[in-house]
Amino acid sequence: MTAVAEPQSWRRPPLIQSRSLRWLLTGLVPAYLLVVLLTLDVPLARIAAGMPRAMEMAGALLRPDFFSRADAIWLGLKESLAMTFAATFLGFLLAIPFAFGAAANIAARPVYHFCRAVIAISRSFQEIIIAILFVAMLGFGPLAGLATLVFAGFGFIAKLAAEEIEAMPPATLEAMRASGASWGQQMVYGVWPFLLPRLTGITLYRLDINFRESAVIGIVGAGGIGATLNTSLDRFEYNSAAAIIILIIGIVLMTEYLSQWLRRRLR
Amino acid sequence: MTASAPHWNPWPRDRLLRWAGFALALIGVLAWSFMVISEATIWAFVLDAPQQGRDLFGRMIPPDLGFARELGRPLLETLHMATLGTLLAMVLAVPLAFAAAENTSPPIPGLRWLALLLIVASRSVNSLIWALLLVIILGPGVVAGIVAIALRSVGFIGKLLYEAIEESSPKPVEAMRSLGASPMQERVYAVWPSVLPAFVGIVVYRWDINIREASILGLVGAGGLGLALIGAIDTLAWGRVGTLFLVILATVLFSEWLSARIRAKVT
């Protein structure tokens, strides 16, 4: 038996195996940074001028003012919450047929392609861009926000739900088919009971996203707390703006933990 | 022998009651939501929405493709904002994540909670809202966009990274400790290599989300495609808006594809 020589030195294994790719990447990053720094015009004077404002804002964050604009803040919050709830529910309803249609294991080919295309359209644009279009069509206010969140939300829910259906073990449906169940019966007694808890979980997740988005789309006129925030910044009311941001953070955290807690209980 | 039930009753009484209670609560919340939204809606504007919609899309199609030639610089700015913002966030998030993870947080009282608080605050505020504030401080332009992207991404990367650190195996750390390694050596040689692939995946994933977000930050005055978009909307040049939608869509799809490919290789 020959003794295996113990290695006398050790070197950390690299993340990227290929030596040439590794050197290429380590060279590219500094080169990129250099090019960007040279081409980007950084308005140093403007940034220096903004520093007092930064201090003012930081000060406002320590002394948020919930009261002098209480009416506007309350209205904005009400609109945001109403949009969130209504849009999540409508998105859920609209997502159900598309979830079934976009699952490759149960839908006919043409239906599958149609549903996947609709879902792709719903998911590919940012909420704020959809909001711009709906504000132009429906006028300012939370109705445009509602339409935006329904449009963007149902594709999200439908896609994740369709993937759940596709991951479903085939045994249940095979057993039902073997005992002579029709397609409709398979859907109602086979797929639906499997899907419902998962669909609920996905919808709760979307509820949380919808509130976050509802706080933003107001910037382009779709109502909600984002509109209130935009107005207060335009009026240089930083203390009210700070109060709104604190409220947004608080509610986002609450909906996030609530939705996490509910989803854990569902499982 | 147990008596077998003659019929399968899918709706036992207690289950029915629970569902009825849930349905009532849901109806109540939805009724309130629709009331709030309908109060804030000017229905006269909604009634002519189909016409407005036809009008809008009629002007957007065909898109003004000649305008695409002017979009090189905005597109480049969007890419820079996303990339630099992600790099900045990446650098800031690593110490934050190590301070927030239960198993690597240094024993300084309060430090872990401070890190968790910073991560939560960063994550709960949408990058568009960060941009709204930063444009006031830093002035309109790319710099505000970079910082907005970074501020939003720190929380995202920080959260996923500290979760990865907490889930990493304690065995390499114990092995190193028994050899007499210092806490710093444990983190560099045991914890870091085990989370490195996850870290790269998280950063690339966030980069692709950031491309999506950077393309609209211009709506509130940060640079990039969003700035061109708001300019086109304000001048009612809907043909240009159509072109911009196409460019944004192509950019987002490309970055999504690239990020999915890189992540498939790394993890």
Image: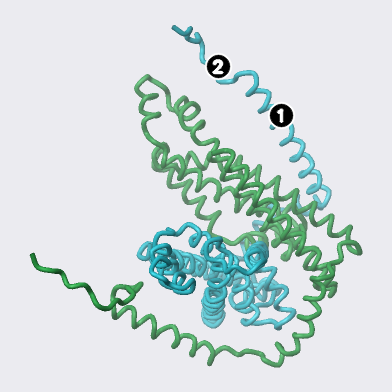
Chain colours: A green, B cyan
Above or below, A116 against B16 in this view is below
Q: Determine whether the residue tagged by mark 2 lies in a helix, strand or loop.
A: loop
Q: Are marks 2 and 1 on the same chain?
A: yes
Q: For marks 2 and 1, give the CA distance.
A: 20 Å
Q: Amino acid at mark 1?
A: Gly
Q: Nearer the viewer, residue B9 or B226?
A: B9
Which residue is disc 2 drawn over? B9
Disc 1 sits on a residue from what chain? B
User: Residue B173 placed where, x, y %?
Assistant: 43, 64
Outermost residue to the right: A68
Residue B245 visible in the displayed image: no
Where does the N terminus of chain A fall, quadrant-wise? bottom left
> Residue tagged by mark 1?
B21
Seen at 31% across and 77% down, the residue is A11
Say which residue appears at 36% left-offset and 28% top-offset. A174
Q: Secondary structure at mark 1?
A: helix
Residue B92 appears left or right of B259: right
